[in-house]
Amino acid sequence: MGARPKMIMLSVPASQRWRSVRRFVFMLTAFVPGAVFASWVLVQLTGSGAFWWLAPVMTFGVIPVLDHVVGSRPSNPSAATSDRLDGDPLYRWATYLYLPAQYLSLIFACWLWSGGGWLVMNVVDKAGLTVTVGIIGGIAINAAHELGHKTSRAERRASKVALAQTCYGHFYVEHNRGHHKRVATVEDPATSRFGESLYRFVPRSLVGSLRSAWALESRRWARAGRTRWNPRNDVLNAWALTAGLYVVLVVWFGPVVLPWLVAQAVVGVGLLETVNYLEHYGLRRQRLANGRYESVSPEHSWNSDTLVANLLLFHLQRHSDHHVNPARRYQTLRTRAEAPQLPAGYGTMVLLALVPPLWRRVMDPRVLAHYDNDIRRVGLSPRAALRVGA
């Protein structure tokens, strides 16, 4: 008999293996709303109401720990890989599937709030469930953020649907046509200022963003020669989705669910605005000789390359590249060497922002270092800028 042929082992590069795994890891985000069902099952099995708080424990406890243990991955796909990733439908399904999971969890939560679930929930239990649902709604705003930047009409409509749970439909208008144009300037309500606490920023951003969205739509319809009070107004039809959703849920489950629906919306919007706070804190685009602002660059957004949070947030933490290339799909967003880096992932930074002295102790030196300690280049409030002559 002849010699037995040798088997040739083809080694797959680690980067290629990682990309193959990452395709499916991104799909895990679509299962985030499953936290409501998981909480219910765990409560049933253990009898402990502590599991109604599953989502905040995961978001602000487990994931930051995993981020710290796993670390950052600042690698970028090649041009050829980016083209392949951009056309891969699996990544789009990760955003599409979030919406049905989001609303199934909301309906299930309403059933629980209204007395279903074959168990007795006290106020603390219902509060925990509310925070869990609110975090799901807050992450839904992130899914809406990804969908709303695309040119597909279906994706843009899906963006409004994702925003309906948190009553934040005007984000669709303000973020795309307001924030991206004015980011890192004093005119942008969603850009936090150096020395501004989270508790001062949130009311300013809430009111300013709402006013801006309404003004943008009013001007759009004025240019078209039509009244702004029409069903194609993107602020009005987005709010109508929320009103319709809430009416259906109240009729279905009773008025008892209404306070909890409002509370979960507050949690979701609060999470979104806190993320807004940390994404551009203290950064500023400089004015040119012609009075205009310099173009948006990676230097005008804080980045974080922590692996776990990026996979669960559709690469939202690669925020610098997103602002330079807003139409780029999340799976091809790149880390940028010029971008200032947050010291940790979003989960940790949100907790830090809740304690203003601690936040300033960590972040203010980083802002100053980013601008070579030139306070005149820092994103100050207009009043503070006048004091330093900026």
Image (tube, grey):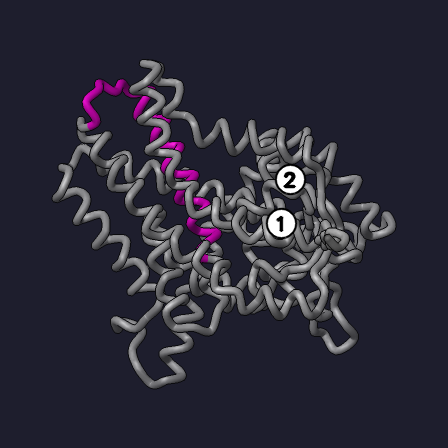
Look at label 2 and name its amino acid: Gly
The answer to whether residue 147 shows anywhere in this view is yes
Report the front residue among 199 and 107.
Answer: 107
Look at label 1 and name its amino acid: Gln
For the point 41% across and 25% down, the residue is 53
Comes first in the chain, label 1 or label 2: 1
| 32 lies above or below 354 | below
| 376 lies above or below 355 | below
Number of numbered markers: 2
Of all residues, the one furthest to the right in this rendering is 372
> Which quadrant is home to the C terminus?
bottom right
The quarter of the displayed image where residue 5 is located: bottom right
Report the front residue among 383 and 282.
Answer: 282
Q: Magenta: predominant secondary structure element?
A: helix
Residue 173 position within the rendered picture, expressed as x and y whole percent measured from the top left: 43, 65
Of all residues, the one furthest to the top in this rendering is 47
Magenta stretch bounds: 117-144
Mark 1–mark 2 Cα distance, whole angstroms, equals 8 Å
Circle 2 is placed at which residue position?
345
Q: Callout 2: helix, strand or loop? A: loop
Q: Going by the image, does 332 lie left or right of 78?
A: left
The quarter of the displayed image where residue 68 is located: top right
Circle 1 is placed at which residue position?
317
For the point 30% across and 47% down, the residue is 103
What is the crowding at mark 1: few (fewer than 14 residues within 10 Å), some, or many (at least 20)? Answer: many
Label 1 with label 2: CB-CB less than 8 Å: yes
Residue 383 position within the rendered picture, expressed as x and y whole percent measured from the top left: 67, 51
What is the crowding at mark 2: few (fewer than 14 residues within 10 Å), some, or many (at least 20)? Answer: many
| 63 lies above or below 106 | above
Residue 214 position within the rendered picture, expressed as x and y whole percent measured from the top left: 39, 65
Q: Residue 141 got which mark? A: none
The quarter of the displayed image where residue 261 is located: top left
